[in-house]
Amino acid sequence: MKALKVISPGPFTTVQDRGRFGFQSLGVPPCGMLDAWAGGLANLLVGNGPDAAVLEFTFMGGQMEVMDKFCLAVTGGDMKLSINDRPCAAWATHMVQTGDILRLGPVHSGCRTYMAVTGGICVPDVMGSRSTYTGAAIGGLDGRILAAEDILERGQGAFPDHSRALPEEWIPKYLSEIVLRAIPGPQDDYFETETFFNAAFTVTDKANRMGYRLKGPVVLRKPEKPKSIISEPSLPGGVQIPEDGQPIILLAEQTVGGYAKIATVISSDIPKLAQAVPGDWIRFEAVTLARSHEIYRQKAALFREIGKAGLGVKTYAAMGKTFFSDPVFRQRMERYMIQI
């Protein structure tokens, strides 16, 4: 079913899902939503399964014409969604009709915004995923960023039986000072780690889906250690230290690398990095592998609780407000939010 016609696409808008796995040995990176938390909640809001594809907007949204009736939700960076020039809340569902005009402007906080539609964005499946990898022109819509006049289709899906919204206090706040928890290694013994874990670095303009280059105090390599390593598989979150001593945090479009890695940002914190923009400050906090697993389990439990409760709220136009149907659920959710 035709869903959206692109009027203006924004500077870098792609189709992404959870990612393409099992092909890194062939030089194909996983790709997928950089902020899997925001993208996953967008799908949850509209009632999609976890593998549904969404649109990922970077720095600025665009304008699109609706070609069918469906439910949509926008999450992530604040790009001020409007429908027919009427401001609409993010992190909430909206029913749209044929002929409606959707607009997303420049981002006001964060970096990347996600739009989910009923049934998911429907493009050909390539190697088990609909994610766009522009580096090899595969996946998504012809393997490229969206362009004016593109037509996007959606899959089959049921409309939610009520409006849904994430409570304000549970919507992520995208700050200009970010703490990323990281596990030391695999080559932390190559470096003077005190600088890395005690200094602040700024995000440079070399920040994209491949990785983020940072600038700050030089992270010194121990003189007896080699300047590079034999190339080894790279994973999102790996923090490379090249010869200039300035960290590079790898993201979803890498497969191998030959720079030693001082640490690995935990997967639960990758969404915070995905919403960082040039000029933001980043600090690293060392955590153990056990603590990383604990954080992951807590965040997964939070996501499951949101799904089981139908987002925890119902919006009633007659009342003009949202409320929680289960106070026990609210207390449990607040506990999760504090912990992660």
Image (cartoon, rainbow, N blue to C red):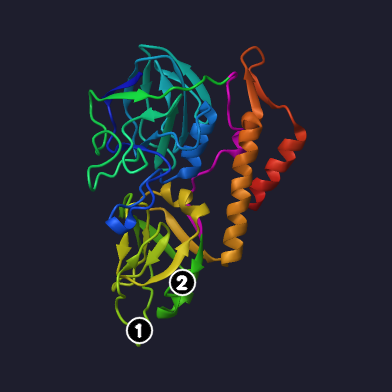
Quadrant hosting residue 287: bottom right
| Residues rendered magenta in the picture | 161-180
Q: Residue at the far bottom: name it.
A: 224
Residue drawn where x is 62% and y is 58% of the image: 294
* The label number, if any, that marks residue 74 in the structure image: none
- As rendered, which of 187 and 47 lies closer to the eye? 47
- Dot 2: what SS? loop
Please state if 97 lies on the left or on the right of 150 as rendered: right
Residue where numbered disc 1 is placed = 225
For marks 2 and 1 on the same chain, the one whose residue lies earlier in the sequence: 2
- As rendered, which of 204 and 263 lies closer to the eye? 263
Residue where numbered disc 2 is placed = 185
- As rendered, which of 169 and 233 lies closer to the eye? 233
Residue drawn where x is 41% and y is 78% of the image: 191
Residue 317, x across and y down, in percent: 61, 14
Disc 2 to disc 1: CB gap under 8 Å: no
**Is 279 situated above or below 147?**
below
Residue type at numbered disc 2: Gly
Residue 261, x across and y down, in percent: 39, 70
Total numbered circles: 2
Please say whether residue 5 is visible from this viewpoint. yes
Residue type at numbered disc 1: Lys
**Is 247 situated above or below 161?**
below
Q: Is residue 141 magenta?
A: no
What type of secondary structure mainly makes up the magenta span?
A: loop
Please state if 33 lies on the left or on the right of 300 as rendered: left
- Dot 1: what SS? loop
